[in-house]
Image: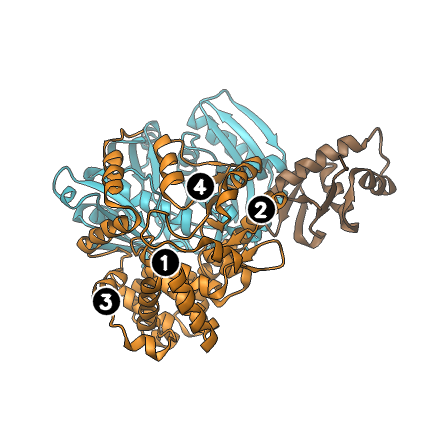
Chain colours: A orange, B brown, C cyan
Amino acid sequence: MTAARLLVAALRDPGSVAGLSAEQWTALLTAARAERLIGTLAHRLDRRSVPEAVARILADAEEGAKQERRAALWEAEMARRALASLDLPVVLLKGTAFAAAGLDAGQGRSIGDLDILVPRDALDAVEQALRAFGWEPVKEDAYDDAYYRRWMHELPPLIHRERDRMIDVHHTILPPTARPTPDAEALLADAVPLGNGLSILSPADMVVHAAAHLYADGDLAGGLRNLWDIDRLLREFASDDFWRQLDERARRHDLAGAVRRALRQAADLYGAPIPDGWRARFTVDPLYRRRLLARDGWGRQGHSFTRLGFYIRSHWLRMPPLMLARHLWTKATRKPA
Amino acid sequence: MTTPVYAADPPSARAVVELDELVAVLHRPSGATHLLASPAPELLDALAEGPADARTLLERLSRRYDLIGSEADAIEARMEELVTAGLVWRA
Amino acid sequence: MRHAHAVRVGPVGFRVGAAWRAPVEALAALYEGYPEPEGAIPDLTVRLYPERPWRRWLRPSVAISGDYWLPDAAPLPLEQGLLAAEMGMNLQVALGWRRHLLLHCSAVERGGRVLLMSGASGSGKSTLATLLAMNGWRFLGDEFAFVSLEDGRIHPFPRAASLKNQAIAAVRQAGGTVGPVIEDTPKGRIGYWRPPADALARMAETAPPALLLFPRFGFAEAVEPMAPSEAFMRLTQASTNYVALGEAGFTALSRLVRTVPALTIDYPDSATGMALAERLWSEA
């Protein structure tokens, strides 16, 4: 079994780790780190029933995840304080949202940058307010700056000069140039306030966003974690009403295909609950599966040809062809700093 | 312009160790460490009674300490530094 | 990976994998006599690999990665593969270890108490620790001091000391064996000094810190006491995991600076540095 398969099995069924050899444990832990799922694994496994050396590594991971969670929630609070005077909805996205809302998907999860969603027409005011509170642009490069503002669905990333933490300010969940065009107003309109001045997406939109992120907005890197998020969200939200809402929202955001593929993939890997009717209509895409499970016992991402294919694919999805050519050409001819 | 009212997390949100003339403070919600000189630690303690503006803080401090030449303006300047550090916010 | 070696240094189990045989063989030779990772499950993984597939043969260059990595870690030529392995191990510890507070310090022990020396590259902390270890002190490490989060005791991490430029001659002159030596690295000439058998045999034996020195090499002899708050601030800068540890790090570091006297020492040459350290130790 490849390391990635060991990891998926351990997350799905913690009992599957019984009897693993030292070599298999090493491969599993290394793959879990590389996929940024070690904190989640630590949360899932019972440390009393694993070898001592493993228990120590898992204890470290659990503690690390706790610190990451604290730092992430603090960044959210700092953003809230910076933006309070604008009187805007500030919607937390991804890991920070899961942690702030106390969702299962946030348990042990590694959380990096802060991602927030704000109304598009408030972007300038948001940027000014953040700058006044100590955030500043990461990239000084004029081309990158224009690229972000024009083609991506976010401000250029800002970093806080004292805390050294990044914030990504989005006005939608996919680049405007991507073929699907999510309904950003609906995302904001249905956001759920947490009661502390911050909001999260509605349950259905949260799943749609995770799916969009996986297939349309990236090269499947971090796919195992992303699908784990989806699995946990589905287990927490599953109900007849929820499936109806999810179907409606996925169509509304022009992401029905991506959402169904993601759900099917989550069901395939982690046994996520999905409606029978949805399961029957689709088969598992072997290329995606192979790509997702490519991590080896040294933490390396294998199958480099598959990877290149996905890299190009993700760029095509993000940008119409002419723009892609221009982007690659500008990147290629830019002199190194 | 109205005078700002400041608030802080309760003292249980901070671990405090006196090193010398400086006090090391770990702010638990942020995980950040601050080295504070007087009167910053005293101002944080004074906020334990609840949110207050600079004048009220001055009154609270003068109940506990003999203050010489302290003015609300100076307190406000210290409070703004604590706001920047994330230890205090404008209520 | 094609070639691999696993080794335990103090509390840390490492596994180093490489696309080439040479770096792994050099590593195995340098760490001969060190134990295996506990339970044969390493804590940290280092990977040495060609930056591009063809770079395994053509002007081979060794990229360093592992469980933790930096985006801007520059690759090294294959002749410096051992240095790449060592840097990879340092990187994993610096970014990944959280069972102790890590201070960028050398550490030696005598009479059951530990002398810590903190300083940047060029301060002479490695040289002083090596020379003291050849002079009746037990060598605990020249790169990281592992401070226990529970009781503040120092755990040995007796890696081979990495000596740079003039330090190689200074240690040889004092009768020490330095080798292998790697020329023309980004840090100049680097030579490794293997800790004595005693340091290896006692690598699980912890001891409390008693004195903290901040040495500066190349200045006229001077000693200045340092306030606890300044030591605290400087050690947060000299720690790779203080922030990541949260309150546990705060507790360990504030305990250290309140209980252990700190001094800066300037010294013009190794002999003066040694004499100063010995004198201050006897007064501490």
- Mark identifier at residue A212: 1
Q: Which of these two is toward me, B82 or C208?
A: B82
Q: Which of these two is toward me, C110 or B7?
A: B7
Q: The disc numbered 2 marks a residue on which chain?
A: A
Q: The disc numbered 4 marks a residue on which chain?
A: A
Q: Residues within 10 Å of mark 2 (few under 14, many from 20)?
A: some
Q: For numbered disc 3, what is the local secondary structure?
A: loop
Q: For numbered disc 2, what is the local secondary structure?
A: helix
Q: Residue furthest top?
A: C220
Residue A116 in sight here: yes
Mark sitting earlier along the chain (2/1): 2
Mark sitting earlier along the chain (4/1): 4
Mark sitting earlier along the chain (4/3): 4
Q: Which of these two is toward me, C85 or A220?
A: A220
User: Which residue matches tag 2?
Assistant: A78
Which amino acid type corresponds to the residue marked 4 in the rendered image?
Leu
Q: Residues within 10 Å of mark 1 (few under 14, many from 20)?
A: many
CB atoms of marks 1 and 3 within 8 Å: no
Mark sitting earlier along the chain (2/4): 2
User: Which residue matches tag 3?
Assistant: A285
Q: CA gap, disc 4 to disc 1?
A: 19 Å
User: Which residue matches tag 4?
Assistant: A155
